[in-house]
Image (cartoon, rainbow, N blue to C red):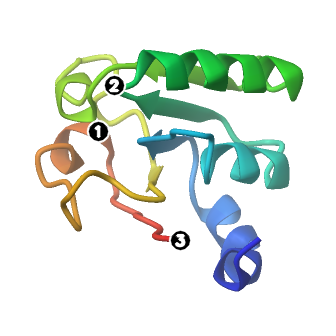
Amino acid sequence: MPLALRRHSGEYQARFGPYLDLGSGGGLPGLVLGDLWPDCRFTLVDAGERRCDFLRSAVERCHFSDRFTVLHGRAEALGHEAALRGAFDGVVARSFGHQVSPPSVQPHSCTRWSACRF
């Protein structure tokens, strides 16, 4: 686990509610944070259907089904869904396309922007 994550993981858990992991891919950092923070809920978003199938399988194998949701779709499109607007207090992303910060997703997906780069 990266040193920065170990150093601050307790602080972020205490301050934030549900997390959104943009571009979850292989589950980093969402699945790792879920293991560290067993009281937090997570939504993992990825545009790749095969990656989402993998994430669903990993969530089930890790027994996280009660607090993890996997959404297949592009973040910029999902960010416009009313049910997802303002639903997340923290957003994490290992990497996110070619942009440093996804401005088209930010205002629609979370009440605060807390992007963690690993």
Q: Do the residues labelled 2 and 1 touch (CB within 8 Å)?
A: yes
Q: Which of marks 2 and 3 is nearer the N terminus?
A: 2
| The image quarter in which residue 58 lies | top right
- Mark 1: amino acid: Ser
Placement of 11 over or under 73, stated as above or below:
below
Tell me the element at label 1. Answer: helix
Residue labelled with disc 3 = 118
49 left or right, relative to 111 = right
- Mark 2: amino acid: Leu
Q: Measure how far apart labels 2 and 3 are at the Cα level.
A: 25 Å
Residue labelled with disc 1 = 109
Q: Which of marks 2 and 1 is nearer the N terminus?
A: 2
Q: Measure how far apart labels 1 and 3 are at the Cα level.
A: 21 Å
Q: Position of residue 85 (x, y in %)?
A: 28, 30
Q: Where is residue 76 in the image (x, y as percent from the top left)?
A: 18, 34
52 left or right, relative to 79 = right
- Mark 3: amino acid: Phe
